[in-house]
Image: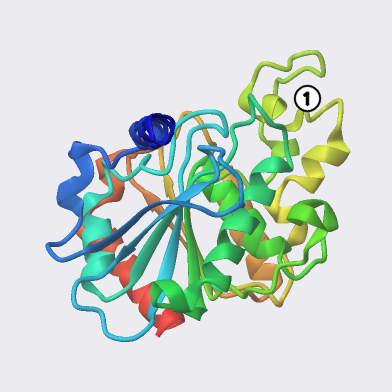
Amino acid sequence: MKTLHLIWLSLLLVTATVAQQLPKTPDAIKDAFPTGTVFHANIPYAGDTLRKHLLDIYLPPGAKGNVPLVIWVHGGGWMHNDKYADMGYMKGTIRAILEKGYGLASIDYRHSTTAIFPAQIQDCIQAVQFLHDNAMKYKLDQSHFALMGFSAGGHLASLLALSNNNNITAFYPGGRKPSFTLRSVVDFYGPSEFLMFYGDLLPTQTSDPISVLLGASPLARPDLAKQASPATYVDKADPPFFIVHGEKDPDVPTAQSYLLKAWLDLANVRNSLTVIKDAPHYGPMFDTEPTRQALLAFLDSTLR
C-alpha cells in the first residue's frame, strides 16, 4: 500500500511539473480577448511532447455551431518568439476578429536554430491539418480556414497557401499530403523572395536569419532559397491575399511585398497591398481602425 501511495505521489509531482512547464497566456495580452472567449490552450498537434508542437484555440463568445477560423502564425526571424508573439501590438484586431464571430488559432513551430527548413513549414502544415481533422471537436468550420502571419510568420503563411496545390512532398510531415483547403491569407510584411532579399550578401556570410533558416547562404544554395520562397509557387489557383507592409520597414524591404503582389497580379489572383506610411517592421501602427476594418472586410468576403 505504501508503494502504491509513493507511485501515486510521484505521478502527481510529474503532472504538476509538466503543467508548470507549459506556456501560459501572458497577462499583457489577456485584455485582447472579449469576455466569454473560450480558451483551449497548449494542444499538442504532432503527437509528441515538443513545446514547439503546441497550438491554442480561441473561440468567440456565445458561438453557435462551427465557426470560421483564422490561424495565427507568429514572427521572430524563424528563430525567436512563440504563439503569443505579435499579439501584444495587435490586440484591437484580435478582439475585432473574435467579436465578428471568427475563431482564432495560434500555432507554434520549431525554431531554425534547432531544426532547419523545411521543418517550419512542415510544422505549420501539420498544425493546420490537425485543426482540420479535429474541427468537429473544437467547433470549427473546416471548409473556412484563413492564415494570418507576421514577418517570418507571414512568410510561412504565404508559403503554405501558395504551395498547397503544388505537391511539394518535401513540405509534407511524414510524407502525408494535406487534405485541408485555405480560403485566404493575411500577410503582414512577410518575405516573399529570398534571392532578392540581400543586395550585399556574400556566400560566406551565414549568420543572417535566412541563412540560418536554410542552413546555407541563399547565394551558396539558390535552389534552397527558391524552394523556400513563396513567390516560387504563385499560380491562378491560389487563394486571395491581403498584404500589409510598413513604409519604413528596416528588416524586410517593402519590395518583398510589391514583388509578391506583382506575381499575384500576373496570375490573376485577387489581392491587395496596403503600405502603412512611416510604419516600421512591426508595432501598433498596424493595429489602426482603417487597416482593421479593411482586414475584417477581406475576411468577411472570403470566410462567410
Q: Is residue 242 something that shows in the picture?
A: no
Residue 97 at x, y percent in the picture? 28, 66
Seen in the picture, residue 280 relative to 240 is either above or below; the reply is above
Q: Secondary structure at mark 1?
A: loop
Amino acid type at mark 1 = Ser
Q: Locate residue 253 relative to residue 198 in the image: left or right.
A: left
Q: How many marks?
A: 1
**Residue at the spot 43% in from the left edge and 80% down from the top edge:** 303
Seen in the picture, residue 182 relative to 25 is either above or below; the reply is below
- Please identify the quadrant where the N terminus is shown: top left
**Residue at the spot 69% in from the left edge and 74% down from the top edge:** 179
Q: Locate residue 211 relative to residue 288 in the image: left or right.
A: right
- Please identify the quadrant where the C terminus is shown: bottom left
Q: How is the model colour-coded?
A: rainbow
Residue 238 at x, y percent in the picture? 66, 72
- Toward the viewer: 133 or 264? 133
**Residue at the spot 75% in from the left edge and 32% down from the top edge:** 214
**Residue at the spot 33% in from the left edge and 75% down from the top edge:** 297
Q: Quadrant of residue 138?
A: bottom left
Residue 166 at x, y percent in the picture? 80, 66
Label 1 belongs to which residue?
217
- Toward the viewer: 177 or 72? 177
